[in-house]
Image (cartoon, rainbow, N blue to C red):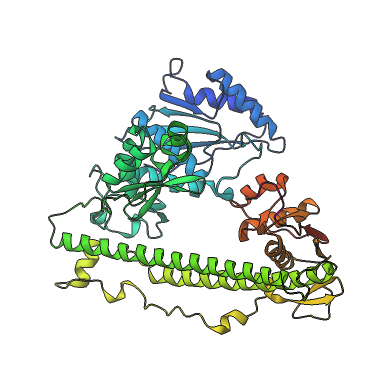
């Protein structure tokens, strides 16, 4: 495919309605009145109306909602190389991939395939106004052409088109898309892939995992009549369908492909509409061993290379699973110890109860919660470090077939330089006492009668950053993100779930921190914003606000 021609802006004097009507007619006209333009295939998405006239009126109405945007309509052109012509299914898939890469899948779009030039080309008119929020979306934070070129690379790889000579991006062997800094211009013509040489294969001698998912996995997903059948059929060919967050992944051996990339009807939402709520694969189900399809099984030592590659990724998966399991056990052990400490506190008075000593109990609970929150932060940091160390150890991908042969000669095994030396994973006492300046460990608790002030260790005689008054935690003026984070850590340790009170800016900051650190906000009105914060985190800063909670347990109501 050739490069994108770009997003074509509207003339300044053109109103939204005139632009949408004119461009919509141009995209989808058949050529009956103008022999120079011929649209042989067209479509539209994101509309309730079924007729072109109704769809255009619907797009105009949504565009008018964006009163601050003069022109929320983007026009893109995708052009195939001479001699190439996509089929209807390929056009629909190309639109899927393009919208997915730009993050505009739910948006309104008109598209039409034109054949009036030597190069078949597809026009897309996209309304950047989100149909639910009415906000104007900036694809890829304004760098939409970069995202569009990534989409081109994916379309070329999945559908087997000739790669544009100076294409900006290239699909790697593991299915990821990376910028081609060298481009084809730095290679000799003899090294370039000849036109019409068949489906793309990667240097590892393996077919693209995304193509395998589309060509083999997608038909099995569509044919399944229930979840058990879906998992069984995929496992028989070495594939797995797993839920991941709000979507799903289709695993090809050890390579994950977004299920939605294999087709809109293979996304988790689409499959759940057809088969019901997601059901995981049965425990212990056997999945056939598979990486990707061998391209040259008769080449010298191919089977040996294939087996070594399988063993490499099997060891990687096993070590990752073991680390996750150990981390889960350590978290559970710390939580159990904290529960025991709280129970011991409630039974620690000489009389065996705290009646008449509520103020003292609140102080002791605050001090205990602060210490436990610091221990939670230490454990979380150590787990992050260990995951990073393991990731660095396994960061290198297994060598390509040619590089493996060159590195080994006549010997078997992995080359020494394939992975860096393993660093020792050592937990020392020193780690637990290292004070960080960004969370509750940077604060010291000072008791004043019925309240506990929390001041920075760097300024213990200064003003408190926040104050625990038992049933509420007051965050003082002139505070910052780190202080709010420490206060929320204390609230989460004391109450589990809690509610925040303050102006909108402060609440947005709490939402961002809750998304980052898994705090459970009990505010029903903040749940939608909390879900959105996982996609795009923003830092805000606001003085004098507070978070409140219940001393009797988690706050009722929805939490993340």
Q: Is residue 436 visible?
A: yes
- Which image quarter: residue 541? bottom right
Q: Main secondary structure of the magenta part?
A: loop
Side of 37 where 375 appears, left or right = right
Residue 552 position in % (x across, y down): 74, 57
Side of 339 where 394 appears, left or right = left
Compared with residue 64, is residue 466 higher up or lower down, i.e. above or below?
A: below
Residue 450 position in % (x across, y down): 86, 70
Side of 301 where 190 appears, left or right = right
Quarter of the image where the N terminus is located: top left
Side of 174 where 472 appears, left or right = right
**How many numbered badges does the structure rendering display?**
0
Q: Is residue 261 magenta?
A: no
Q: Which residues are magenta?
A: 554-560
Residue 172 position in % (x across, y down): 35, 55
Q: Residue at x 53, y 18 (%)?
A: 51
């Amino acid at each position: 495919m050739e490069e994108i021609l770009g997003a074509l802006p509207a003339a300044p004097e053109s109103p939204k309605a005139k632009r949408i009507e004119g461009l919509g007619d141009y995209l989808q006209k058949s050529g009956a009145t103008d022999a120079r333009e011929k649209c042989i295939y067209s479509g539209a998405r994101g509309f309730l109306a079924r007729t072109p006239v109704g769809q255009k009126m619907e797009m105009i109405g949504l565009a008018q909602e964006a009163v601050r945007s003069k022109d929320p309509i983007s026009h893109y052109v995708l052009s195939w190389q001479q001699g190439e012509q996509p089929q209807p299914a390929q056009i629909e898939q190309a639109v899927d991939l393009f919208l997915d890469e730009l993050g505009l899948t739910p948006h309104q779009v008109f598209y039409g395939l034109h054949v009036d030039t030597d190069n078949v080309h597809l026009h897309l008119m996209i309304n950047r106004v989100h149909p639910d929020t009415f906000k104007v979306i900036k694809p890829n934070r304004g760098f939409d052409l970069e995202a569009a070129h990534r989409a081109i690379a994916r379309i070329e790889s999945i559908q087997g088109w000739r790669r544009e000579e100076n294409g900006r991006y290239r699909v790697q062997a593991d299915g990821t898309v990376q910028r081609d800094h060298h481009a084809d211009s730095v290679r000799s013509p003899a090294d370039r892939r000849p036109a019409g040489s068949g489906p793309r294969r990667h240097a590892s001698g393996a077919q693209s995992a995304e193509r395998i998912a589309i060509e083999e996995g997608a038909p099995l997903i569509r044919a399944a009549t229930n979840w058990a059948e879906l998992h069984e059929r995929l496992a028989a060919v070495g594939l797995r369908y797993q839920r991941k967050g709000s979507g799903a992944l289709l695993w090809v051996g050890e390579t994950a492909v977004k299920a939605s990339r294999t087709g809109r009807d293979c996304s988790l939402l689409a499959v759940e509409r057809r088969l019901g709520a997601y059901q995981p694969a049965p425990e212990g189900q056997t999945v056939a061993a598979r990486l990707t399809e061998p391209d040259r099984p008769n080449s010298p030592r191919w089977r040996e290379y294939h087996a070594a590659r399988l063993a490499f990724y099997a060891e990687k998966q096993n070590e990752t699973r073991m680390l996750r399991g150990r981390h889960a056990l350590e978290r559970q052990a710390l939580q159990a110890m904290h529960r025991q400490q709280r129970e011991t506190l409630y039974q620690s008075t000489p009389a065996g109860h705290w009646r008449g000593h509520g103020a003292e109990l609140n102080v002791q609970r605050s001090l205990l919660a602060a210490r436990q929150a610091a221990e939670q932060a230490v454990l979380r940091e150590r787990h992050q470090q260990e995951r990073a160390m393991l990731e660095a150890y396994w960061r290198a991908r297994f060598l390509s077939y040619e590089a493996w042969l060159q590195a080994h000669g006549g010997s078997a095994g992995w080359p020494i330089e394939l992975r860096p030396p393993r660093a020792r994973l050592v937990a020392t006492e020193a780690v637990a006492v290292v004070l960080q300046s960004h969370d509750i460990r940077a604060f010291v608790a000072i008791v004043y009668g019925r309240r506990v002030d929390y001041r920075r260790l760097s300024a213990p005689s200064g003003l408190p950053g926040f104050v625990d008054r038992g049933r509420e935690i007051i965050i003082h003026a002139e505070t910052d993100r780190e202080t709010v984070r420490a206060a929320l850590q204390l609230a989460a340790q004391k109450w589990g779930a809690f509610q925040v009170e303050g102006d909108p800016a402060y609440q947005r900051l709490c939402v961002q921190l809750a998304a980052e650190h898994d705090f459970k906000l009990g505010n029903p009105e903040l749940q939608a914003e909390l879900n959105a914060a996982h996609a795009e985190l923003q830092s805000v800063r606001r003085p004098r606000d507070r978070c409140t909670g219940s001393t009797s347990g988690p706050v009722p109501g929805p939490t993340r």
